[in-house]
Image (cartoon, helix red, strand yellow):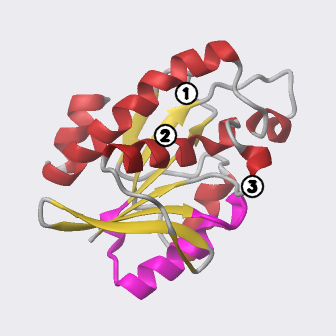
């Protein structure tokens, strides 16, 4: 069983904000697989489906970003998911808009959602796709990440959101090293 998590903040006021790129990617994946996130459990909006003989859970934690790990931990414990089968999609201030990076593991890099996941799972060894949102150092970080994407940024982000389902299909079929080599 694979758990694919998109990080974001619940509530319509956070739609199309930089911090919610994970939610946007999960929406793209669910549209591709023609499934709806219509179940609620442990403060998580999710769906389960089978792909090529593998059970897949798509999850949008419905606690705020800095509590995402609590939701993920509940799913991991309930569904008996190994941390090697978790993939988290999140925003990354250190990567330019229009770019992304796949990683096996790593530090939180100051990302509060990732910090909380590490705290709750007691490891930083879970796979991730970090989607670049750049960093405007002239603005407070909190205001920047909770700010809406501009028109030019959305133009750069859309091709990544559209590519995410293909990355996920490869993730489900290939060793992660091969997926990283193909997309990084």
Determine the residue positioned at 76% across, 22% down.
136
Q: Position of residue 49 (x, y in %)?
A: 29, 66
Kindly report the distance in space between the C-alpha atoms of the residues bearing marks 1 and 2: 8 Å
Left or right position of 112 against 99: right
Which residue carries the number 1 mark? Answer: 95
Determine the residue positioned at 24% across, 48% down.
171
How many numbered tags mark residues here?
Answer: 3
Is the residue 133 above or below the residue 107 in the image?
Answer: above
**Tag of residue 11:** 3
Q: Quadrant of residue 47?
A: bottom left
**SS category of the residue bearing label 3:** loop
Kindly report the distance in space between the C-alpha atoms of the residues bearing marks 3 and 1: 26 Å
Determine the residue positioned at 41% across, 34% down.
101
Q: Position of residue 174 (x, y in %)?
A: 14, 48
Inspect the magenta stretch and tell me whether residue 175 lies in it.
no
Determine the residue positioned at 71% across, 61% down.
66
Quadrant where the C terminus sits is top left
Is the residue 30 above or below the residue 158 in the image?
Answer: below
Inspect the magenta stretch and tell me whether residue 84 lies in it.
yes
Nearer-N-terminus badge (1/2): 1
Magenta region: which residues? Answer: 61-86
Q: Are marks 1 and 2 in contact (CB under 8 Å)?
A: yes
Which residue carries the number 2 mark? Answer: 130
Left or right position of 50 against 184: left
Quadrant where the N terminus sits is bottom left
Labels 3, 2: front one: 3
Q: For the residue carrying disc 3, how many other residues have a C-alpha within 10 Å: few (<14), some (14-19), or many (20+)?
A: few
**Tag of residue 12:** none
């Amino acid at each position: 069983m694979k758990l694919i998590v998109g990080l974001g903040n619940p509530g319509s006021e956070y739609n199309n904000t930089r911090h919610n790129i994970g939610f946007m990617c999960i929406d793209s994946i669910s549209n591709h697989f023609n499934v709806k996130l219509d179940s609620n459990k442990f403060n998580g909006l999710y769906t389960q489906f089978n792909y090529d003989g593998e059970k897949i859970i798509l999850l949008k934690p419905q606690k705020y970003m800095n509590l995402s790990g609590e939701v993920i931990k509940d799913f991991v414990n309930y569904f008996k998911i190994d941390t090697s089968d978790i993939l988290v999609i999140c925003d990354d201030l250190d990567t330019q808009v229009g770019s992304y990076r796949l990683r096996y593991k790593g530090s939180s890099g100051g990302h509060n959602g990732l910090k909380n996941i590490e705290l709750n799972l007691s490891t930083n060894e879970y796979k991730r796709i970090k989607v670049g949102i750049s960093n405007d150092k002239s603005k407070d970080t909190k205001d920047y990440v909770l700010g809406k994407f501009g028109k030019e940024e959305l133009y750069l982000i859309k091709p990544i959101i559209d590519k995410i389902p293909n990355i996920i299909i490869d993730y489900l079929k290939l060793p992660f090293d091969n997926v990283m080599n193909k997309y990084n």
